[in-house]
Amino acid sequence: MELTQTVNTAGGSVILRPLCADDRNHGIFDLLAQLTQAPPLDAEVFDAILAAIDANPNHFFLVAEDKERPGKLLGTAAVLVEQKLLRAGGRVGHIEDVVVDASARGRSIGKLLVNFLIEFSKDRGCYKVILDCDEQNVAFYKRCGLEKKEVQMVRYF
Amino acid sequence: MELTQTVNTAGGSVILRPLCADDRNHGIFDLLAQLTQAPPLDAEVFDAILAAIDANPNHFFLVAEDKERPGKLLGTAAVLVEQKLLRAGGRVGHIEDVVVDASARGRSIGKLLVNFLIEFSKDRGCYKVILDCDEQNVAFYKRCGLEKKEVQMVRYF
């Protein structure tokens, strides 16, 4: 599939594309901070993570950029493809860290991000995608075609 | 940390170690079939998956082998370590596909597997581990130190 796509939304065109090095200065951390703690990373650390992700065909960071304001990021999401032994060596796409900038909500950018990663996962041979979310976001993900299944458990160190 | 460990249980000693090529003939698929569909893989496919996992420091398949019956697998579990940009480039351990053979339940082998993968995740710099489970397994994972947090959503293709 094409990893850079231009999509029309109610508020103007949006470019969906892989995260790149310049995004460190274009608000990727401001976006992620709307989800949880996300202090900016030094360029060296950021570039090393980006290089590792680029080298891994099973890990993908997607961003949505405002076509009218080059460099302005409106949203981001990631997917990690897991290789399993069960299901005949099946694969699962884990969708992570979906966030849309507060200024850009209501334009269906979240749905565009999730749909992109669903297609990406299909393209990588996955038999399903999964994600964990707050109860308050269940309705949104249902609109993306997902349904409630299990319980997420966590242990922080 | 040591990736091969011998542990005493109520029913005899158990070896915790990485999955290896011979395990294809030692019941790994019989184990996984107690969890979900898990048809046996051909040696060629199995070995290719194993090679990819061995080459990836962020993906680990653990097995529990009966020390008294070499080659007899009693349980398995896996962990996939996810690199994030948030939390200062934090990492998360995704624990997957935990299963103990029906003949070996009640010996705390499940807890040994989960605890091993928790230590593995700490060793790889994770700030948390997460997993998804049926409501009926919540009590077990609470005994492993995890707590309920979010809702898992899924879309099958």
Image (cartoon, coloured by chain):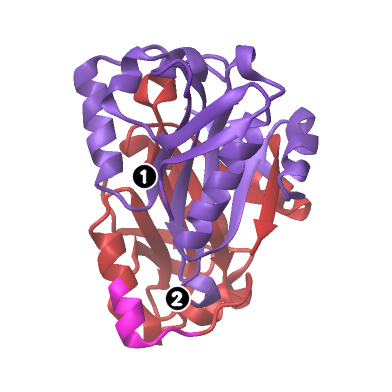
Chain colours: A red, B purple
Q: Is residue B79 above or below residue A9?
A: above
- Image-based side of A106 in relation to B38, left or right: right
Label 2 neighbour load within 10 Å: few <14, some 14-19, many 20+: many
Camera-nearest label, 2 or 1: 1
Distance from label 2 to label 1 (Cα)? 20 Å
Q: Residue at x 68, y 56 (%)?
A: A155
Q: Amino acid at mark 2?
A: Leu
Q: Secondary structure at mark 2?
A: strand
- Which residue is most to the left? B44
Q: Which residue is mark 1?
A: A120
Magenta region, residue range: A40-48
> Residue A11: where, in percent of width, then height?
53, 69
Q: Residue at x 55, y 37 (%)?
A: B7
What residue do we see at 27% from left, 42% from top?
A: B54
Name the residue that disc number 2 marks. A73
Could you tell me residue A7's position as x and y percent? 40, 58
**Crowd around label 1: few <14 · some 14–19 · many ≥20 (10 Å):** many
The amino acid type found where label 1 is placed reads Phe
Specify whether B51 is left or right of A91: left
Tag 1, which secondary structure?
Answer: helix
Indicate the position of residue A88 as horizontal and vertical percent values. 37, 19
